[in-house]
Image (cartoon, rainbow, N blue to C red):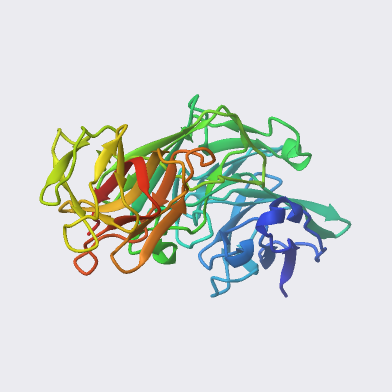
């Protein structure tokens, strides 16, 4: 005869992540040496799917502690990786009264401990590998459920998530790794001692870092499986970071591209991370960042010139003062209908003419940033491949918020699409910079 513990928790959604703590149902009493089955809902674990619903993984496991602090492993019995409710089984339960169920990283859950009164030691893993888009690391979560006795029956009173989530997106499609640190080196992950009484009551101070087992001030994110696109974090997809709940002084987030280029975003404001809640960055993490392997062509302070349609002029660059030719092409080859000139250090040209932007071997144009517009009209600027518009915006010197950013990172230059052009409907007269990044293999 099988004795069954049922841990009920509704499938959580992103907008109501903390509303699924309540777990209920009662089951027959536990007999020594019997097979025990625990059916566990998904508020506790394990990956987010479309719509924010949390699912268990078939490789998940639980630890159950009895009142003598003896740990018993429970294994997932299903085969599906998209189960909203999972059954875990201990085939030879020899313990006495069960008191707590614990879930976290499957490779180290055997090292979980219980002091026999109210403190459970577990972890939010610092190295988090994300295997699905719109999800968090497969081994990143940590949750505890208290088992209570009602007469001869047992049920799980609550199942509490011991982590918070930070949601983010990226513009670039070639970022391989992300590291996250607090500005004051706060403990973000690793092993912690949880006061289960305070956790159940949602009282402050329910966790303390266990520096003996290993607390972490830095979280490392990687991506694999269906969470990746061409081996990298996908552009315009959501991902989540699992963090120990707390109030942070700020964050330092370092992004690493496949070409080795790095860039760091610093958030200097306080961030409150509540247990089982989600914080979200409004803008992509890499928006506006310059990576170490990027080239910036600065067109904001070019020398005075008048172009005769036969040559080129140099643009300053942040890479060892290298000069790149900035070729200008008109409606008919290299002939303009008038002079191209510098008006108060703004590049100016007639409506309808186009400027061929530099091609740099091994690099691709990812962004144009317009810092000012000189003329009083409101031309529409476009970056194109000669046929298709890749980015466009109308700019007015009095009403636009500068810089105006044209993001073309989703359209990398290639052998089949090598050229990029800048045009304006109306007189073009701007200061701007061009950002190039190395082409990923």
The reply, left or right, for residue 279 in relation to residue 339 is right
Disc tally is 0
Q: Quadrant of residue 307?
A: top left
| Farthest-out residue, front | 338
Return the x and y of residue 311 as percentages of the image width and height: 11, 48
Closest to the observer: 429 or 318?
429
Return the x and y of residue 47 as percentages of the image width and height: 56, 60
The reply, left or right, for residue 172 in relation to residue 16 is left
Closest to the observer: 288 or 115?
288
Closest to the observer: 206 or 137?
137
| Farthest-out residue, top | 184
Can residue 224 be seen here? The reply is no
User: Is 253 situated above or below 152?
Assistant: above
Quarter of the image with the N terminus in it: bottom right
Return the x and y of residue 380 as percentages of the image width and height: 43, 54
- What residue do we see at 35% from left, 47% from top? 368
The reply, left or right, for residue 151 in relation to residue 167 is right
Can residue 346 be seen here? The reply is yes
Return the x and y of residue 10 as percentages of the image width and height: 73, 63
Quarter of the image with the C terminus in it: bottom left
Closest to the observer: 124 or 291?
291
- What residue do we see at 37% from left, 61% from top? 390
User: Is 114 situated above or below 385?
Assistant: above
- What residue do we see at 36% from left, 48% from top? 428
The reply, left or right, for residue 132 in relation to residue 35 is left
| Farthest-out residue, left | 310
């Amino acid at each position: 005869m099988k004795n069954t513990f049922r841990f009920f928790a509704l499938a959580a959604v992103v907008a109501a992540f903390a509303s699924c703590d309540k777990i209920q149902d009662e089951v027959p009493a536990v007999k020594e040496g019997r097979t025990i089955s625990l059916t566990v809902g998904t508020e506790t674990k394990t990956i987010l799917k479309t719509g924010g619903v949390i699912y268990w993984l078939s490789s998940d496991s639980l630890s159950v502690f009895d009142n003598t602090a003896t740990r018993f492993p429970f294994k997932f019995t299903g085969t599906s990786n998209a189960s909203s409710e999972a059954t875990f089984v201990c085939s030879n339960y020899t313990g006495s009264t069960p008191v707590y169920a614990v879930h976290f990283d499957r490779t180290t859950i055997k090292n979980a401990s219980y002091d026999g009164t109210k403190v459970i030691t577990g972890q939010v893993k610092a190295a988090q590998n994300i295997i699905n888009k719109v999800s968090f690391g497969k081994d990143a979560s940590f949750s505890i459920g208290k088992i209570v006795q009602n007469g001869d029956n047992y049920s799980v009173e609550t199942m509490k998530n011991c982590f918070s989530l930070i949601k983010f997106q990226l513009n670039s499609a070639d970022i391989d790794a992300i590291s996250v640190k607090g500005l004051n080196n706060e403990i973000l992950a690793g092993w912690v001692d949880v006061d289960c009484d305070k956790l159940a009551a949602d009282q402050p101070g329910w966790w303390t870092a266990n520096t003996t087992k290993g607390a972490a001030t830095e979280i490392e994110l990687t991506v694999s499986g269906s969470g990746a696109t061409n081996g990298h974090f996908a552009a315009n997809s959501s991902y989540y970071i699992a963090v120990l709940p707390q109030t942070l002084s700020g964050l330092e987030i370092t992004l690493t591209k496949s070409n080795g280029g790095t860039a760091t975003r610093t958030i200097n404001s306080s961030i409150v991370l509540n247990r089982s809640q989600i914080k979200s960055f409004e803008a992509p993490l890499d928006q506006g960042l310059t990576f170490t392997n990027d080239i910036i062509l600065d067109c904001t302070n070019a020398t005075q010139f008048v172009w005769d349609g036969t040559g080129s002029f140099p643009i300053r660059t942040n890479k060892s003062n290298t000069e790149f030719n900035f070729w200008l092409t008109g409606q008919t080859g290299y002939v303009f209908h008038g002079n191209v000139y510098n008006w108060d250090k703004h590049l100016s040209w007639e409506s309808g003419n186009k400027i061929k932007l530099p091609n740099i071997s091994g690099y691709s144009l990812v962004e144009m940033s317009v810092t000012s517009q000189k003329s009083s009209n409101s031309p529409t600027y476009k970056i194109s491949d000669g046929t298709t518009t890749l980015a466009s915006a109308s700019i007015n010197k009095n009403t636009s918020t500068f810089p105006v950013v044209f993001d073309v990172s989703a359209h990398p230059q290639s052998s089949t699409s090598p050229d990029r052009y800048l045009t304006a409907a109306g007189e073009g007269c701007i200061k701007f910079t061009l950002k190039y990044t190395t082409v990923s293999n």
